[in-house]
């Protein structure tokens, strides 16, 4: 098992995510600019619309960037795992720093979760944004690394088995 196992994003799925982001962003704009005569609703609409515009606008930018300049979503090799599946991915994790790997479902979303030894040390290497988002995930009871395969053709259960097999062979 000295070969790399590389998971690339599916461009068709990325394109569909772009369309979905545009729809959601349009909806946020509609809510923001929707004028109702009742003043309380107008302010609530402005707040909800602004939050939606910021969130879905950021998502759209991230997805377009990934569509234009695709990255490998996940690379598994004899050294460890390189995760690029989300905007807050930790990056490379050597096998000897991985405590456990498992599947977690949040609503309809399935993630491959990676528990990392010395997470505080790993967080020091990250940007302010990534560090705080991962700390927020930890406070919510989630794993520090949550790999999503939505933009690929792989099932999380298949990839989990591959990760476990690589880890078993290459752990020192």
Image (cartoon, rainbow, N blue to C red):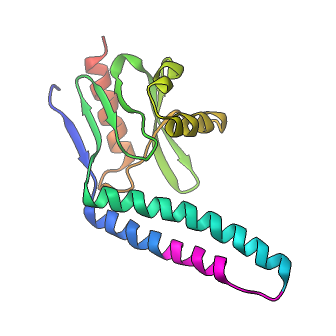
| Above/below status of 24 relative to 86 | below
| Image coords of residue 142 (percent x, y) | 58, 37
Relative depth, front residue between 153 and 70 = 70
Relative depth, front residue between 93 and 121 = 121
Quarter of the figure that contains the C terminus:
top left
| Residue at the extreme bottom of the image, as rendered | 37
Chief secondary structure of the magenta portion: helix
| Image coords of residue 103 (percent x, y) | 47, 40
Left or right placement of residue 34 versus residue 171 in this view: right
Magenta includes 6?
Answer: no
Left or right placement of residue 84 versus residue 132 in this view: left
Relative depth, front residue between 53 and 2 = 53
| Residue at the extreme top of the image, as rendered | 172
Magenta includes 26?
Answer: yes
| Above/below status of 57 relative to 32 | above
Relative depth, front residue between 102 and 68 = 68
Quarter of the figure that contains the N terminus:
top left
Q: Image quadrant of residue 69?
A: bottom left
Please state the extent of the stretch shown in magenta in the rendering: 23-37
Q: Image quadrant of residue 43?
A: bottom right
| Above/below status of 129 relative to 32 | above
Left or right placement of residue 94 versus residue 27 in this view: left
């Amino acid at each position: 098992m000295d070969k790399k196992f590389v998971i690339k994003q599916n461009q068709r799925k990325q394109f569909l995510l772009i369309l979905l982001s545009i729809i959601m962003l349009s909806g946020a704009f509609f809510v923001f600019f929707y004028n109702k005569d009742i003043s309380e609703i107008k302010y609530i609409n402005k707040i909800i619309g602004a939050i939606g515009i910021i969130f879905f606008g950021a998502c759209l930018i991230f997805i377009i960037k990934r569509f234009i300049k695709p990255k490998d979503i996940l690379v598994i090799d004899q050294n460890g795992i390189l995760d690029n599946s989300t905007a807050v991915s930790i990056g490379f994790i050597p096998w000897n720093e991985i405590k456990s790997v498992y599947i977690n479902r949040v609503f309809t979303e399935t993630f491959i979760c990676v528990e990392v030894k010395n997470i505080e040390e790993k967080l020091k290497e990250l940007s302010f944004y990534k560090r705080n988002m991962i700390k927020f995930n930890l406070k919510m009871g989630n794993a520090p690394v949550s790999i999503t395969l939505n933009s690929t053709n792989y099932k999380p259960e298949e990839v989990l088995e591959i990760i476990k097999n690589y880890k078993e062979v290459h752990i020192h």
